[in-house]
C-alpha cells in the first residue's frame, strides 16, 4: 500500500501520522511477570513442571468459574485436545495413525479465526460451517437448528465467541442438548465475558482460552483447556505430556502430544492474571469512546448490548451501512475501491489508518470462503438441502458472515490507547466518508 496516496489527499490535510505505531491489540506488561519468571529461573524450575503452572491452573479455574484448567502451549492445542476428547467420547478410540473424527462431520462457527476449526481437520473430521447472525456476530442458532435438520447424525459443535461478545449461548446449549451433541466453546477471545453472569468457557462440555500475545492478557503464548469433567482434565494433561503410561520406561498405550505449557510462560500468565479485569475496563473505554465519536457516521459498532450478556470488549469493530459503502472489490489476496463522497469501505479505512501509522484489521474472513475449505458445506438459516450451497440453482441464501466481512473492520483496540488517539483515529475515519 502506498501511504503517500493518503498523506497527500486533501481530505486528510493537517493530519500527521502517529509518531508511535498504534496497535490493534498488543501485550501490556506490568512487572509482576518478572518476579514469577525470575523465581522459576532461580529455583531451576524452567521446564513443563513447576509452581507457576500449578498456580495458573488454579487461578484460571477460579477466575473463569470452572472446575479444571489444563495449562497448554497454545489455545489451538487446547482446541485440538477438546476436539479429540469429544471425538473419543462419541466415536471411540481410533487405532494409531487414524483421527478420532474420520468419516464424521462437525458443526463449526464460520466467521472466525482458522484455529477454531482446523483441529477438526487434525482429527480427520469434516467441518460444516454454520452461518453468523447480526445480533452477536456469532453462530446463528437458527442456522444451527437448520443444520441439525439436514445432518441429524452430527454430534459435535465448535462455537467461537468472537471479539469478546458472547454468542446466544443458552440457546445454543439447548439445541445441542436436544440433538445429543457435545459443545466445544472457543473462548480464546472472550475471557471474562459473561452471559447471565456466567462466564464464556463454562457453558460447553469443554472449552479453550488463549494467552496469545494479542489477547486480553498474555503469557507471550500459551492457552488452557477448561472443563468441569475431572476425567477429561486428567486425559488432556496426559495427552499434552506425550501420553506416558505409569511404567518404569516410556510406555505408550495411545498417541501423545508435546502441548504442555512451560513454567516460564506460566510465570508471565501468573503476573498478568491480576490485571485481566483492568484490561477489560480499558477495552470497554475504547469501545465507548469509538461508539460516541462515530455516532454521526453511517456505521454501527460490533454488537455489545445483546440481552443478558456482558462482553470483554477485546476488539472494537465497526460495520458500514450498506448504502454508505463505496464500491469495493476483493480478490483472494488484493482489494480495490472507488472513493465516493459520503461513502467509504473497510479497504479505504484500513489503508488510511495504516498510512497514519495505526493498525486495524479486516473482520475474520469466513471459513466457507477460504480456499482450504472450499469443498465444505455451509448452512444458513435458509439452506434447503445438503448440497453445497453454490451448486444448487434457484436456492435463496443469506450469507451474514460474507456481508459482515465485506462491510466490517476491527479498529485499533490496544488497551493503552489514549482518548486523544481514539479521537484522532475517529477523525481519520470521518474524513474517509468526505
Ligand atoms: C487466538 C485465537 C485462537 C488460537 O489461540 P492460540 O493461543 O493463538 O493458539 C483460537 N480461536 C480464536 C477465535 C482466536 O482468536
Image: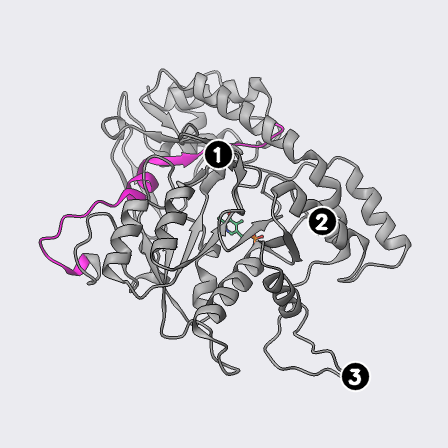
Looking at the picture, does residue 155 appear above or below residue 418? below
Residue 301 covered by magenta stretch: no
Residue 406 covered by magenta stretch: yes
Q: Is residue 109 something that shows in the picture? A: no
Judging by the rendered image, the residue that carries numbered circle 1 is 196
- Which region of the structure is painted magenta? 390-416
Left or right of 344 on screen, residue 223: right
> Number of numbered discs present?
3
Q: Position of residue 286 (x, y in %)?
A: 53, 25
- Residue placed at 41% from the left, 42% from the top? 170
Judging by the rendered image, the residue that carries numbered circle 3 is 248
Judging by the rendered image, the residue that carries numbered circle 2 is 58
Q: Secondary structure at mark 2?
A: helix
Q: Nearer the viewer, residue 40 or 382?
A: 382
Q: Position of residue 417 (x, y in %)?
A: 59, 26
Nearer the N terminus, badge 2 or badge 3?
2
Q: Locate the N terminus and report the quarter of the image it occupies.
A: top left
Q: Is residue 188 something that shows in the picture? A: yes
Q: Nearer the viewer, residue 101 or 21?
A: 101
Nearer the N terminus, badge 1 or badge 2?
2
Q: Nearer the viewer, residue 353 or 225?
A: 225
Q: CA distance from mark 2 to mark 3?
A: 30 Å
Q: Secondary structure at mark 1?
A: loop
Left or right of 351 on screen, residue 343: left
Amino acid at each position: 500500500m502506498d501511504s503517500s496516496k493518503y498523506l497527500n489527499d486533501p481530505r486528510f490535510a493537517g493530519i500527521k501520522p502517529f509518531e508511535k505505531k498504534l496497535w490493534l491489540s498488543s501485550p501490556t506488561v506490568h512487572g509482576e511477570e518478572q518476579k514469577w519468571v525470575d523465581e522459576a529461573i532461580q529455583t531451576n524450575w524452567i521446564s513443563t513442571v513447576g509452581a507457576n503452572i500449578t498456580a495458573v491452573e488454579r487461578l484460571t479455574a477460579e477466575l473463569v468459574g470452572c472446575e479444571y484448567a489444563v495449562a497448554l502451549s497454545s489455545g489451538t492445542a487446547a482446541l485440538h485436545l477438546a476436539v479429540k476428547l469429544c471425538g473419543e467420547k462419541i466415536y471411540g478410540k481410533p487405532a494409531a495413525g487414524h483421527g478420532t473424527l474420520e468419516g464424521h462431520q462437525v458443526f463449526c462457527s464460520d466467521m472466525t479465526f482458522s484455529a477454531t476449526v482446523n483441529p477438526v481437520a487434525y482429527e480427520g473430521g469434516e467441518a460444516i460451517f454454520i452461518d453468523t447472525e447480526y445480533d452477536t456476530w456469532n453462530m446463528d442458532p437458527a442456522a444451527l437448528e437448520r443444520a441439525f435438520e439436514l445432518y441429524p447424525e452430527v454430534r459435535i459443535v465448535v462455537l467461537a465467541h468472537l471479539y469478546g461478545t458472547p454468542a446466544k449461548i443458552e440457546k445454543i446449549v439447548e439445541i445441542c442438548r436436544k440433538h445429543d451433541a457435545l459443545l466445544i466453546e472457543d473462548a480464546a477471545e472472550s475471557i471474562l465475558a459473561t452471559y447471565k453472569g456466567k462466564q464464556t468457557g463454562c457453558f460447553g462440555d469443554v472449552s479453550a482460552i488463549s494467552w496469545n500475545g494479542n489477547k486480553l492478557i498474555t503469557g507471550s503464548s500459551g492457552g488452557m483447556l477448561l472443563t468441569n469433567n475431572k476425567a477429561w482434565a486428567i486425559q488432556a494433561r496426559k495427552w499434552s505430556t506425550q501420553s506416558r503410561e505409569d511404567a518404569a520406561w516410556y510406555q505408550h498405550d495411545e498417541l501423545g502430544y508435546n502441548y504442555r505449557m512451560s513454567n516460564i510462560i506460566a510465570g508471565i500468565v501468573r503476573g498478568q492474571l491480576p490485571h485481566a479485569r483492568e484490561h477489560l475496563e480499558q477495552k470497554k473505554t475504547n469501545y465507548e469512546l469509538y461508539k460516541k465519536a462515530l455516532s454521526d457516521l453511517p456505521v454501527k459498532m460490533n454488537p455489545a448490548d445483546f440481552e443478558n450478556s456482558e462482553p470483554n470488549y477485546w476488539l472494537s469493530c465497526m460495520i458500514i451501512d450498506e448504502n454508505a459503502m463505496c464500491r469495493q472489490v476483493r480478490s483472494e489476496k488484493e482489494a480495490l475501491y472507488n472513493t465516493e463522497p459520503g461513502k467509504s469501505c473497510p479497504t479505504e479505512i484500513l489503508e488510511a489508518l495504516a498510512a497514519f501509522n495505526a493498525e486495524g484489521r479486516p473482520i475474520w474472513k469466513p471459513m466457507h470462503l477460504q480456499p482450504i475449505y472450499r469443498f465444505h458445506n455451509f448452512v444458513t438459516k435458509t439452506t434447503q438441502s445438503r448440497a453445497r450451497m453454490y451448486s444448487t440453482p434457484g436456492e435463496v441464501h443469506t450469507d451474514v458472515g460474507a456481508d459482515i466481512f465485506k462491510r466490517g473492520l476491527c479498529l485499533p483496540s490496544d488497551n493503552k490507547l489514549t482518548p486523544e488517539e481514539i479521537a484522532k483515529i475517529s477523525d481519520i475515519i470521518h474524513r474517509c466518508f468526505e
